Amino acid sequence: MPWESIQTALRFAVEAKFITEDHLQLYNNHILEMVQKATTEQCILPTSDKPDLQREELLRLQECLQFSPRDVMAGLVELGVLRVSSVWVDVVNS
């Protein structure tokens, strides 16, 4: 799923009250931190003394991300936004 589709689905989840706006922001910040860590570790982005410029570049890279729906759900579970049920465990283990 492209990042834009993930955001559309998560915004729908907020509107339907499955998750809160805070949960959406928590997830997005989590992904942004993962992008930042990966780019730093692999020296993709030069370290900048201008945090706003670096954040803009990270957000641009974030727009290029693609995740499977299962990865999105796993991220939400990892952050405590969603709870794990026995059905979810079966899906993860399949």
Image (cartoon, helix red, strand yellow):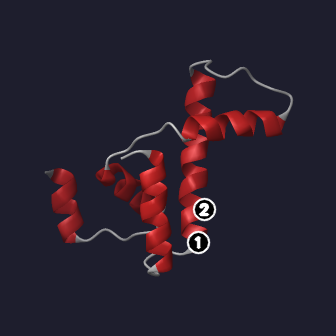
Whole-percent x, y for residue 5 in the image:
42, 53
- 79 versus 2 height, above or below: below
| Residue at image point 75% right, 24% down | 47
Q: Which amino acid does label 2 sit on?
A: Gln
Q: Which amino acid does label 1 sit on?
A: Glu
| Residue at image point 60% right, 62% down | 25
* Label 2–label 1 contact, CB within 8 A: yes
Q: Outermost residue toward the bottom?
A: 17
Q: Is residue 75 left or right of residue 56?
A: left
Whole-percent x, y for residue 32 in the image:
60, 44
**Residue designated by label 2:** 25
| Residue at image point 54% right, 75% down | 20
Q: Outermost residue toward the right?
A: 49
- Distance of mark 2 from mark 1, alpha carbons? 6 Å
- 8 versus 58 height, above or below: below
Disc on res. 21: 1
Q: Nearer the viewer, residue 46 or 65?
A: 65
How crowded is the residue under tag 2: few (<14 C-alpha within 10 Å), some, or many (20+)? few
Q: Nearer the viewer, residue 55 or 64?
A: 64
Q: At numbered mark 1, what does the secondary structure look like: helix, strand or loop?
A: helix
| Residue at image point 64% right, 41% down | 59
Q: Quadrant of residue 56?
A: top right
Disc on res. 89: none
